[in-house]
Image (cartoon, rainbow, N blue to C red):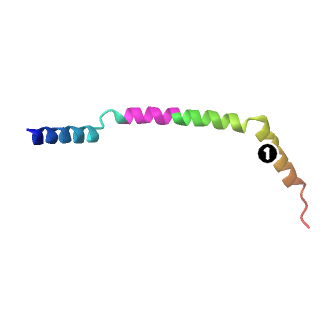
């Protein structure tokens, strides 16, 4: 009796672990949300005043250097 119950629990657990119906939609949704959030954060960082000032300074310094 106990062995049968344990075997049934194992079978149900295996089915739950291998049944992935509907998972792809959820995974795509989470991936899309994560990508959009990362894009928004990256846009905010890159367009921030500190980054623009730093990049402008680097470019100006590179253009002002002389070879020789």
Query: Residue 58 at x, y = what percent?
Result: 82, 50
- What residue sits 46% from the left and 33% below the top? 30
Q: How many marks?
A: 1
Q: Nearer the viewer, residue 26 or 9?
A: 9
Element at badge 1? helix
- Magenta span includes 25: yes
> Is 39 a magenta residue?
no
Main SS of the magenta segment?
helix
Region of the chain picked out in magenta, as a range? 24-33
- Which residue has dot 1 on it? 55
Hey, which residue is sitting farthest bottom in the picture?
A: 68
Residue 27 at x, y percent in the picture: 41, 36
Image quadrant occupied by the N terminus: top left
Quarter of the rendering occupied by the C terminus: bottom right
Eyeballing the image, is 67 above or below 35? below
Q: Position of residue 44 (x, y in %)?
A: 69, 33
Q: Is 57 placed left or right of 8 in the picture?
A: right
Mark 1 closeness class: few <14, some 14–19, many ≥20 residues within 10 Å = few
Taking the view exactly as shown, the residue that stands out farthest to the front is 2
Q: Residue placed at 37% from the left, 36% from the top?
A: 24
């Amino acid at each position: 009796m106990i062995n049968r119950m344990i075997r049934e629990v194992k079978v149900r657990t295996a089915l739950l672990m291998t049944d992935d119906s509907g998972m792809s939609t959820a995974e795509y949704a989470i991936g899309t949300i994560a990508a959009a959030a990362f894009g928004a954060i990256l846009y905010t960082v890159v367009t921030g005043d500190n980054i623009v000032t730093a990049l402008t300074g680097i470019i100006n310094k590179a253009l002002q250097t002389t070879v020789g």
